[in-house]
Image (tube, grey):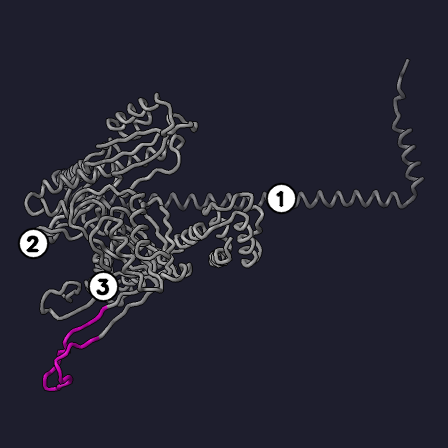
Amino acid sequence: MDETVAEYIRRTVLKIPRDEIKTMLQKWGFLSETQLQTINFHQMKDNISQDVVQCCEENSASIKQAAVLDIIYNHSYPNKRMWSVYQMNKTEEETDFFDLTDFRKKFKRHLRSALKNVTINFREYENNAIWIRIAWGTPYTKPNQYKTSYVVYHSQTPHAFISPSVLKSNLPLLCQALVVASNYQDIHEMELRSHSLNSLEDMVFKRYSQNFETYCPRPLQESTVAQESAAGLRIVQENINEKERIQRVNRDTFGDGPQPKLEFAEYKLETMFTSDPKLEVLDKKEPFRCMVKFHSPHLLESLKSLAPAGMADAPLSPLLTCIPHKARNYFKIREKKGFFPGSFVSP
Amino acid sequence: GGLTPTCPLAGEWRGRMEEGKAHSLGGVFAHLEMLEARAREAAMKQAAAEQRKEQLARLEARVQELRQQRDELRAKVELQEQGQLGKRGAMSDPAQHSAQAVLEWKIRKVKSTLQVFYLTGISGKLTKQGVCFCISTAYEGTYLDSYHLDLLTEPQVRIHHHSIPIFIPLEQIAKKYLQTDIRRFLSVLSDHLNAYVGRRYQADQLQEHFSDQIEGTMQRNSLCNLLVFNYNTSSKSETFPFNARLLYGDLCCSLPTEVIVSSASDAPAALAETAAAHSDLFRRLALHKAFGS
């Protein structure tokens, strides 16, 4: 077995938390049960990884199998990478019979025709998601297995989730291959980025709980009742109407269920500085540039709790609440001169 | 003969006494100590038992007290209620009672009508800016997912929010019908959604109930309009499994438009006929029903 493959497997196993190593190896399925029995999973991770490499030597692992282990690791821990969302367009309207083998063939062929030294691996999961791992090389060097790009594509959707490698120059080639393989015409990047892949999927596929007005009774969450009984019946809330109004407006805006997980929202302002002309603060009539970035471990949940905590007025600014609907967390705010595609004019 | 002596005890006693004498004073004292210990134990047990009895009696008395209190309070509450009723009874008239009852009946009726509309598949509610439609899907008697469409009516009819899956061609259908004929738009969209959930339901049922007949994994896609799998006619693995490829060309239909069933190239010729028969079956029947038969 190749030295580089052994080292790569060893380093991949070292990344996995010790309690998960056995299950992940079982999912991998490359080592037999008897081999797994011989490894002691309670020793130090260094030793476990050495044992695993030993067993892989017995089975003569190639880079292909090592890559599958890497895919399994990244599928279990997708939040370690930063994902961007891309959208593809096509003009024809005929129904697409998405054939997986066809897709894989076209993708590989397109990439390999441009760059011979690439390692490409596919793995399909039950929710119709196809995970593609690409390790990039150059025309003169072998693929660098430590600098990989990942693509997650759901069949028959115009969206792809790409986690690019450090070598950004390969990104156009990757996008092209994706477009060709999925029978679309072009691709562009959406203004949406996050570490949480599931939340990105939820937002783009509209799987999160939105608030729709229907006559069907929705179970109302009486979270305020618990607070009252704990505080005792002798306490009277003076502004209970206002509190209830805020709860209602909040529920209408955000819905009842859990929000998708985003880490930041960025607003770039390019507006004119409006002041008393006598002050003459700015000689030139240039837009006043400024950037506001909101950071949070869970941005949308924190926005949802702003009004009930009394830190903001309800309803919140549409600039903040439109994030899941518009599926973007990068905004450019310009003057209301005209309509700029890709920008959002503040109301 | 054989009469036993009438008082053997004297003899025994004498024997024991002699025994005791033989063991000397130490033996007697030990015996006495043992008896003392036994007496002490018995006394303690009795004391504990008496304590328990006392506690029990006390608790019973408390229970009685509380019960009495409860009855008193209950009587008070009843009296109050009667008093109030009495007051109300004095003021109300039959008309108010029946007005209340009529209102309640009306509310119940409206709720059940709305529930019926919801069950028919397409229901809607007027909102501040337009209308919100709810399309509920079903397949052969089983209610499946519901999807929502929030439409704005000013200045033109357009879609504000929706929860339609991304792979349903919503934009195309909207482009064709939304501005001109909203009923047709809803009907076409409902057909697409119902057919999609129907196909998905069939594939899920197949995977759930007939997994022993399927070899390997079943290949599907998001729209569930292409299914490829290998299967056997019975649970045990046969030498020549069939390969089925189902294409659902019509997105509004839950039955395939094209079915290709083939067996391995080295399979006997008789299997080819069965393959053709199966192909016909898949085209006519729902997938899980075809397997069931």
Q: Can residue A156 be seen in this view?
A: yes
Helix, strand or loop at mark 2: loop
Magenta highlight on residue B45: no
Q: Judge the density around disc 1: few (<14), some (14-19), many (≥20) Cα neighbours within 10 Å.
A: few
Q: In which quarter of the image is residue A277?
A: bottom left
Q: What residue type is labelled 1?
A: Glu
Q: Mark 1 lies on which chain?
A: B
Q: Is residue B127 left or right of residue B55?
A: left
Nearer the observer, B109 or A44: A44
- Do the numbered discs 2 and 3 sit on residues whose CB atoms are within 8 Å? no
Residue A193: percent from the left, percent from the top?
29, 61
Which residue is rendered at x = 27% and y = 38% of the image? B226
Q: What residue type is labelled 3?
A: Leu
Give how far apart the Cα atoms at labels 3 and 1 are: 75 Å
Residue B160: percent from the left, percent from the top?
15, 53
Residue A175: percent from the left, percent from the top?
27, 57
Q: Mark 2 points at which residue?
A: B154
Helix, strand or loop at mark 1: helix
